[in-house]
Image (cartoon, coloured by chain):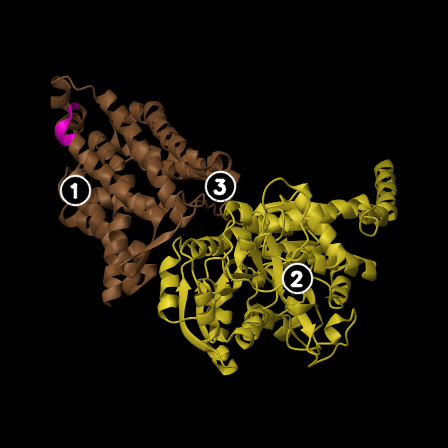
Amino acid sequence: MLADIIYVIIYGFVFASLYGIMTVGFSFICGLGGFYDIALPAYLMVGAFIYVKLSEYIGGWALPITVISTGIICLLHYLVFIKRIREDAFVVFFATIFIALIIQSIFEYFFTTSYIYNYPPLISGHINLLGVKLSKDLIVGGVIGWIALFGLRYMTRHTNIGRAIIAIPQSTLGSRIIGIDITRIQSFVYFLGGLLLGTGAYFYGGYLGVNSHMWSHPLIIMFTITVAGGLGSIDGVILATLLIGILEVAVVTLIDPRLRSVVILMVGLLILIFKPKGFAGKRIG
Amino acid sequence: MKRIFLILTILSLFLILTYPAIAENKPIKIGIMGPMGDATGLNVLRPAELMIKKINAEGGLLGRQIEIVGPYDTKWEPAEGIRAFERLKAAKVDLILSGIVDDSEAGLLSRIAASDDIIYFSEFASTMTFMTNVKKKYNKFKNYFMFTPIDIGMYGCVEEPALMLSKQLGWKNVYLMREDSVWTEGVGEMVLNETPTHGLNVVGFDVIPIDAKDLTPYFRKAEKAGADMIYTFFSSFGEAAASQAWDIKLKIPMIGHNGVLNDYGYWKRSRGAWGPLITTSKWGSLEKHSAEWRDFMVEWSTSYDDDPRTPMWLGECTWKSIKAYKEAVERAGTTETDAVIKELENTYYPDAPTMGGFYGPDEGDWPHSWCIPIDEKARFEKNPKRGAGLWKPSNMIPLTQWQPKEIAPASTFLLPGTPDDYGRLVTIWPSHIAGGTFQYPPYYTEEDIKKLEHK
């Protein structure tokens, strides 16, 4: 039992950081705009496929290109689609569902639904941590995740752009009055969110494999963490990723792996009902 | 009025006189249905395309060209399966090649039974109860043929090599992992009930949702249970299981069915994740197979640029289907359903990758199931003796392992265009087509092997 608990804590921390990388951009975007952009997890899948294909030719150098290109794709997604419809949360919600499904269908066409693509980790090998075997690559992912989360936390407190990201969800009108360019901030956050998604795509895809349906579980995770953490709150995201990461590994390890998604969705549902602002954020709509 | 009557009479006479010629020249229609969005459906379509093209180029079947109707995409939904079947029926096809999975086929059985002018070839399903229909209500279900061995065979082809390895290496503890779908229910029960009677211990089991992406928690459970080997009955996530096993350096050999794992592209998609995986596949060690099958593999792999370029489960079943239908029609001299069915009941392919054939309603419990003679010597005859009590469901499904070039036997056949450093798919069971033996992956230390083999 003790071995299981150690396993849950260690893997919980690692998963939490990966989920954190994937979710923090999503949370900022939703917080800034007051809408849910469901297409973002699909760009995680796009990033993972970019890495799969590029790494065949240029090996590990595919990672920086994946990260930057996912950032650019998310920025374009904002400029082409979201900027036009951002005033209506319902339109954004439905439009981004359509975009995600279109992306999925295109990837199904080119890569089918049955094949799973994999790639070797950039850092191979495992280490044994308190009896728990952990891949070195996943540990690096975990460390990068936590650095990114706390780096963003620092940015939101000590830089103008970071303060603007926090200010806009509090009062969009007030932000405009004091001269914050909302389009510029939103573009930046989409680009930043894309960079983080691209990073998460490499680690997530490397662990679970890449296929044309791989975005559905991250959608559940990102949605639940954002709801639980509170829109646009970096502290909320950190707290919620830890909760969800550890809870997920605990359910899988101690109860039954089949209950993984059910438990996460139940957490999201309970928070929506009993604490709709999440741990530290703003309510949607 | 007289003139109109005269014209109609002449026209009628013309039609009556020319009808046989018209009928003889009309194409034979073969309908194709299955989940076309993925490798499953393509494993029906591609071999059918290649073989029909060849038959047509050689003058057709009984002088008639063969026309493909469809393919109709059934996705993975029973309702789409019904819709596709109805469309093919409306198109008056002579034969249906179906790549739908058992869950969907269950909803089609009554429709198949009610369509006695169509012969239905099931390429994917293996549920035993479907075939009891043929035995119990032969006249209703006589147009239904299953090219995949039924549950008993699916179980046997895992259990027999496991017993062989147990004898050779001392492995005793079995952990069962099966995906949560109809086709694994029967075999899962057999593992739980029959494997302990063969001297092996079933130390645990999991029924895994078909949308599972992370298999590592199940591997961990198997490790904790002290398993020496894992029996796998996977189709949808077999590939994820294989690469994750490689990723976490799983030290428990996996034996069984593993979906799309063993098509040609797996080595590239997984970047050489081979691991301790022994899985059913029909194109391993091609140097041991018949020239006919080997040539067909070469033709398939060079005809398409994208996967699937070699068969997963259904690809070989479809190959056998077209071959069996062509030969049955030629022997019968007609495409008339009853006559063709009678000839199909005389099909037997001792040199097919999955050895077997069909028999009729009076020769045993499993008419129209893919069966082999019980007498091991008779299995290799082209026309083994038929009769009640002489046959059983085929378990002669090859088990293979991906091995890197350095480890695989040098004689392993390479498909044209295969890069030299590409993996080799080596058949390790059954012995008559085995090209090599099970190999431990490099991450097994000598200590690991010693520990595993001396349990």
Circle 1 Cα neighbour tier, 10 Å, few/some/many (<14 / 14–19 / ≥20): many
Identity, as a three-letter code, of the amino acid under mark 2: Gly
| Location of mark 1 (residue) | A236
Location of residue B163 with respect to B62 vertically, above or below:
below
- Residue B185 percent across, percent down from the top left: 47, 68
**What residue is rendered at 76% in x and 62% in y?**
B340
* Left or right placement of residue B218 versus residue A222 in this view: right
Could you say which is closer to the camera, residue B165 or residue B258? B165
Identity, as a three-letter code, of the amino acid under mark 1: Gly
- Residue A133 percent across, percent down from the top left: 33, 57
Could you say which is closer to the camera, residue B24 or residue B144? B144
**What residue is rendered at 40% in x and 59% in y?**
B209
| Location of mark 2 (residue) | B435
The quarter in which the N terminus of chain B is drawn is top right
- Measure the alpha-carbon separation of dots 1 and 2: 58 Å
| Location of mark 3 (residue) | A108
Mark toward the viewer: 1 or 3: 1
Residue A159 is one of the magenta-drawn residues: yes
Q: Which residues are magenta?
A: A156-160
**What residue is rendered at 68% in x and 42% in y?**
B303
Mark toward the viewer: 3 or 2: 2
The quarter in which the C terminus of chain B is drawn is bottom left
